[in-house]
């Protein structure tokens, strides 16, 4: 009995070292495959690159943890998928049509200061998520944005209006007024009562401003913000004029 237990422990240690060796070798092979497919695989994941990356990750997990899977088969699968990624990337550089289908095209979200709701729907991004991305880039007021474009990689590029270009007031020797946060008053046709009260406004006041701007009611408003004692409205269903200019 004692001899058997010692043997079991010995086999467990062997398996442990074999597992560690597989892990190290897998990382090395994955690094090589990634170098072959290019840095784009890391820095600018397209949907296709994401699928390839997930597939290679599954191969690594299977060949490391599943003893029934041949290690050589897993390595071959990793190189095959890496080769597919490289071929598709090369062809997509040569073919615009294939690039549009596999990589995708940029999508306009803000155009001439107007929020393009169809762009939000197409990119499957919520208005709140979009506002968060704007704030992360330093734009707390949508009115400072002339164009916002979601790139094929999923990143959002912002072109500010001339009034919001990054020139410091100290450089221009201009004494500015105190900056305040903008507050959302309407999102997707619904009043945000707490925010309205927090701005010392009333729903009737916001409705009055709506009527002054020619809107019947709030149902046609995608976003309304309060900034610098001014209410700014952004309509729903505003279409872009630049569908084909960003490919």
Image (cartoon, rainbow, N blue to C red):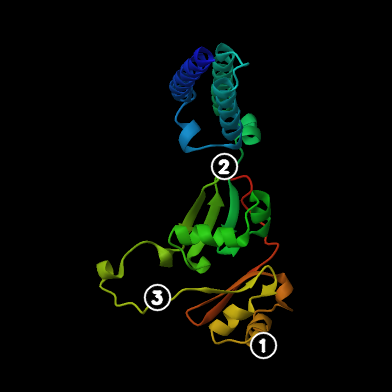
Q: Looking at the picture, how far across and down is residue 179, in whole percent?
A: 40, 75
Residue beneath label 3, please? 179
Q: Quadrant of the N terminus?
A: top right
Q: Is residue 221 visible?
A: yes
Q: Is residue 74 above or below residue 201?
A: above
Q: Looking at the picture, how far across and down is residue 146, in whole percent?
A: 51, 61
Q: Looking at the picture, how far across and down is residue 119, in whole percent?
A: 64, 54
Question: What crowding class fits label 3: few (fewer than 14 Cα within 10 Å), some (14-19), or many (20 or more)?
Answer: few
- Left of 172 or right of it: where is 46? right
Q: Is residue 122 above or below residue 136?
A: above
Q: Looking at the picture, how far across and down is residue 118, in whole percent?
A: 68, 55
- Dot 2 or dot 3: first in sequence order is 2
Secondary structure beneath label 1? helix
Q: Nearer the viewer, residue 8 or 106?
A: 8
Confirm or deny contact between disc 2 and disc 1 (CB under 8 A). Answer: no
- Dot 3 or dot 1: first in sequence order is 3
Distance between the alpha carbons at the discs numbered 2 and 1: 42 Å
Residue beneath label 1, please? 204
Distance between the alpha carbons at the discs numbered 2 and 3: 34 Å
Q: Nearer the viewer, residue 175 or 66?
A: 66
Q: Is residue 95 visible?
A: no
Question: What crowding class fits label 2: few (fewer than 14 Cα within 10 Å), some (14-19), or many (20 or more)?
Answer: many
Residue at the location (53% across, 74% down)? Answer: 183
Residue beneath label 2, please? 152
Confirm or deny contact between disc 3 and disc 1 (CB under 8 A). Answer: no
Question: What crowding class fits label 1: few (fewer than 14 Cα within 10 Å), some (14-19), or many (20 or more)?
Answer: few
């Amino acid at each position: 009995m004692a001899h058997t237990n010692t043997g079991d422990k010995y086999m467990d240690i062997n398996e442990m070292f074999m597992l560690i060796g597989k892990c190290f070798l897998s990382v090395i092979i994955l690094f090589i495959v990634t170098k072959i497919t290019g840095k784009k695989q890391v820095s600018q994941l397209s949907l296709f690159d994401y699928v390839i990356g997930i597939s290679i990750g599954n191969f690594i997990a299977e060949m490391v943890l599943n003893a029934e899977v041949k290690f050589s088969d897993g390595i071959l699968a990793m190189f095959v998928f890496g080769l597919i990624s490289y071929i598709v990337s090369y062809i997509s550089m040569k073919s615009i049509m294939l690039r549009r289908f596999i990589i995708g095209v940029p999508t306009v979200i803000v155009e001439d200061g107007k929020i393009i709701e169809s762009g939000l729907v197409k990119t499957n991004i919520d208005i709140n998520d979009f506002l968060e991305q704007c704030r992360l880039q330093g734009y707390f007021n949508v009115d400072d944005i002339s164009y916002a474009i979601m790139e094929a990689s999923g990143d959002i590029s912002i072109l500010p209006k001339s009034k919001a270009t990054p020139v410091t007031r100290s450089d221009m020797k201009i004494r500015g007024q105190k900056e305040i946060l903008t507050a959302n008053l309407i999102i997707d046709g619904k009043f945000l009562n707490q925010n309205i009260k927090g701005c010392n406004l009333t729903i009737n006041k916001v409705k009055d401003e709506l009527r002054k701007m020619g809107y019947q009611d709030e149902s046609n408003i995608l976003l309304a913000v309060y900034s610098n004692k001014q209410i700014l409205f952004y309509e729903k269903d505003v279409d872009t004029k630049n569908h084909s200019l960003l490919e």
